[in-house]
Image: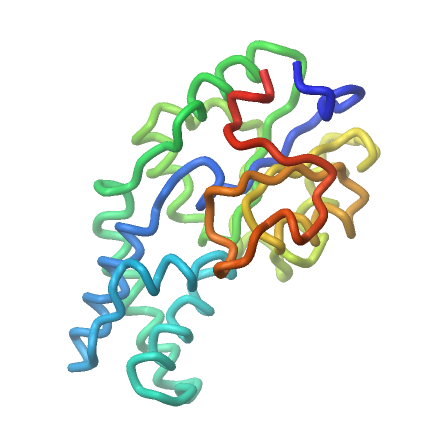
């Protein structure tokens, strides 16, 4: 057992960039949505630097790139709806689990830890993706970016999780790949653990000063 798990009773995982590499599917939906508007496509490499703040912000960044300026609210809303339709048709065919994720979740589930999922991805996409990998029963609670009025880096989703299980935040761990995960965890009073392989807008996640860093989640168990 990794030392960071000492006295921890609940573990909250981020999804995109922590458990799964979803960028290929996200990029396909972004580019299809831009193509519908006759705009230049973004490509997977750019999208990889844009994810992590929810679908609305992802689409806003894509439109800003393609148009060269910030989109108006009405145009952004239409494009966001188009993106959600595109992504909803195929949210997981190109998505992959990172190495060691399945084995780690299996081992943690078999232990005494409560596992939860706190992501900024819209809630509707969580279950289909988890089901694709047979992981839908590993998590006692899942929150999406639209489950509450606030999303990470606001601490509200993590505080909601701790309160739901009647646990003090000091007994909870947030595991993620970005500064938003670490900021949310710290503000909620959670212990924080980072992985360096995900999506952090091109910045080293260790710059956010998490309580711990693992190259692979397999190091937890």
Q: Is residue 46 above or below residue 173?
A: below
Q: Is 91 or 40 nearer to us in this picture?
A: 40
Residue at (27, 51) in percent of width and height: 25
- Left or right of 59? Residue 111 is right
- Left or right of 37? Residue 188 is right
| Residue 2 pos. (x, y %) | 67, 19
Residue at (38, 47) in percent of width and height: 125
Where on the picture, by quarter, is residue 203? bottom right
Q: Is residue 112 above or below residue 26?
A: above
Residue at (70, 39) in percent of width and height: 192
- Left or right of 85? Residue 214 is right
Question: What quarter of the picture does the C terminus occupy?
Answer: top right
| Residue 214 pos. (x, y %) | 58, 31
Question: What quarter of the picture does the N terminus occupy?
Answer: top right
| Residue 9 pos. (x, y %) | 73, 23
- Left or right of 5? Residue 12 is left
């Amino acid at each position: 057992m990794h030392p960071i798990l000492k006295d921890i009773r609940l573990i909250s995982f981020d999804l995109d960039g922590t458990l799964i590499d979803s960028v290929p599917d996200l990029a396909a939906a972004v580019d299809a949505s831009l193509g519908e508007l006759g705009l230049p496509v973004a490509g997977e490499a750019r999208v990889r630097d844009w994810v992590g703040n929810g679908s609305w912000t992802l689409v806003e960044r894509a439109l800003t790139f393609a148009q060269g300026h910030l989109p108006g609210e009405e145009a952004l809303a239409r494009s966001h709806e188009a993106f959600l339709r595109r992504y909803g048709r195929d949210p997981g065919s190109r998505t992959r689990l990172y190495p060691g994720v399945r084995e780690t979740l299996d081992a943690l589930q078999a232990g005494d830890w409560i596992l939860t999922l706190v992501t900024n991805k819209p809630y509707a996409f969580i279950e289909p993706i988890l089901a694709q990998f047979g992981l839908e029963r590993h998590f006692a609670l899942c929150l999406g970016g639209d489950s509450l009025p606030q999303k990470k880096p606001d601490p509200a989703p993590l505080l909601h999780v701790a309160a739901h299980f009647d646990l003090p935040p000091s007994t909870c761990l947030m595991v993620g790949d970005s500064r938003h995960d670490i900021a949310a965890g710290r503000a909620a009073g959670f212990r924080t653990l980072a992985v360096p392989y995900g999506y952090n807008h091109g910045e080293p996640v260790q710059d956010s000063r998490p309580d711990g860093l693992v190259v692979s989640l397999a190091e937890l168990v």
